[in-house]
Each structure stands twice: as structure tokens, then as C-alpha cells.
Amino acid sequence: MIKLLVLGPTGVMGKLISKLALEDDEIEVVAACGINNIGEELGFISGTIDANKIKITDVNKLEEIINETKPHVAVDFTVASATEKNSIICVKNRIRCVIGTTALSQDFLKRFEKLIEEFNAPAVISPNMATGVNILFKMASILTQYLQNWDIEILETHHHRKIDAPSGTALKIGQLISNTVGSDFEKIAKFGRQRGPNKRSVGVKKEIGFHSIRAGDIVGDHVILYAGPGERIELKHQAHSRECFANGAIDAIKFVAKIKKAKIYSTNEVLGL
């Protein structure tokens, strides 16, 4: 049985993951830590039956809660500032992490990777854990090999509450494409276009365009546009609900609980892609 700690259990993703975890025969939720609804039952918050009646506890007491409950895995889909603090505490206690938070800093990732090796606590970090999106990542890498002289634009659309732009998924796509063509991502990424003359630098090796839309309650759409002379190809993924992300998180929890080598894994590796 995998003993699970849920960080941010009252968020949209936290509730979904908690519900699936509470209903899974291979997982035992032993703690749920956050900053809201302290003292309330996790089952009530997530809308499912919790035989153990786990109550939400204050994340500021995380070290104490870890010592009391001894989880094997922690799952975190919160915000970068919280994830960067709490995941360090987890890994130092040899807890394996599944992180879906986006906009994590490079400084944090470098430090976290060293701690993972030091404390022998593997982790899965992915901006998007949906199966379809990770197939999209794979297909983008393959298609780009044949279309390196075409223009490539990445368009992403999310709900109006999303904080970061472009999305972590869009940035991941851009990084995969730049790696495929052997270019420096930071040099060829162009984020939006201002009003007035703004001609595109032709060819993917010169520029990858990113465009973000924030509107309504859209869960998440991503389009990769490849445009050549007289023709174009579009790869598109649409998330109809957040369940695809939550199901991916559950798969990642089961994967990281069993894996032996201490490193940071991607959802591609979870899926065997």
C-alpha cells in the first residue's frame, strides 16, 4: 500500500487527485496539508467517502505531520512558491514526489535534483500528466525532424484564472522542438507580437512563436502549427476536463513509489514513451 501525502488538497487539482486516491485500492491517503479548510475532512472536501476520515492540516506544520504519518509519496499541484518550499522538506525526509506545478525556477530544479540523489528519493515532475499531451510531445519531436525549415507557432488557451503564461505545457513543447533542431530555446522563443511592423523570422531555427489566450473556464487547449510553402499541419490537444491530469498523477504516484533509480522522471517515462 502506498502511503500518500496530498499537498494543496483544496485546489481544483488537489480535490480531484484526493478523490481518485481515496478510491484507489493501492493508495492510502495518510495526510493532506494546505492553507485552507484546516480541520475539515478530506472526503467531504473532495466529494468522496474516506473511511479513515483524514482531516486537512496546516502545511506550515509539514515537518511535524510527516514525522507522524510517514508517507511514502507526496503529490503537489499547487503554486511554484509553495512547491519549491514544501518539496524540499519532503525530499529531505526521503519522501518521493509527484509534482505537476508549473513555473518552477531553474535554481530550484538544480537544487532539487541534487537532493533527490543525496536522499535517494526519486520524483516525477511534469507540466502536464495527461496521456494525450505526452503523446503530443512525442509526435512533435518526430514531426519537427522532417519540418525544420517550416515556421512553427505554438498556441495555448486556458481559463482566465491561470497565472502563468505561456503554459508550462507550451514551454515544454517549445523546448522539445528547439532540442530537436539543435537550437538554444531562449534565443529562438518569441512570446507574442506587438502592434505594428513585426515580421516573423522565417524558419523554425530562427523563431518559435508562442501565443496565450486566457478566457472563461477553458481547461486547456494546445495547438502546434507547422506552416510551409502552400500547406500547413496542425497538431492539437484539447482537455475536456481535468480528470485526464488527475488520472496521470495517480499513475505517476504508483510509478514513483516502485522505481529504484533516484532521479527526476517525466510523464513520458511513466508511460514508457
Image: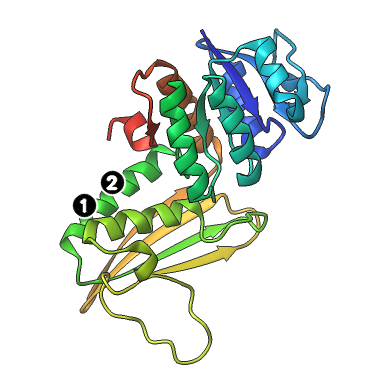
Label 1 SS = helix
**173 lies left or right of 95:** left
Q: Quadrant of the C terminus?
A: top left
Residue type, label 1 = Ile
Q: Is residue 256 above or below residue 184?
A: above
Instruction: From the image, tell me which residue sits under label 1.
Output: 142
The quarter holding residue 36 reads: top right
How many discs mark residues in the rendered view?
A: 2
Callout 1: few (<14), some (14-19), or many (20+) C-alpha neighbours within 10 Å? few
Question: In front here: 52 or 82?
Answer: 82
* Pointer 2 with pointer 1, Cβ within 8 A: yes
At a point 55% along the width and 60% down the height, the residue shown is: 165
In the rendering, which numbered label is found on residue 162? none
Question: In front here: 64 or 269?
Answer: 64
| Residue 237 rendering spot, x and y as whole percentages | 41, 51
Callout 2: few (<14), some (14-19), or many (20+) C-alpha neighbours within 10 Å? some
The quarter holding residue 255 reads: top left
At a point 47% along the width and 22% down the height, the residue shown is: 119
Instruction: From the image, tell me which residue sits under label 2.
Output: 138
At a point 28% along the width and 46% down the height, the residue shown is: 138
**197 lies left or right of 139:** right
Task: Single out the residue that lies furthest toward the bottom.
Answer: 197
- Res. 269 visible in picture: yes
At a point 67% along the width and 55% down the height, the residue shown is: 161
Question: In front here: 19 or 126?
Answer: 126
Residue type, label 2 = Lys
* Mark 2 vs mark 1, CA separation in Å: 7 Å
Label 2 SS = helix
Q: Is residue 268 above or below residue 235?
A: above
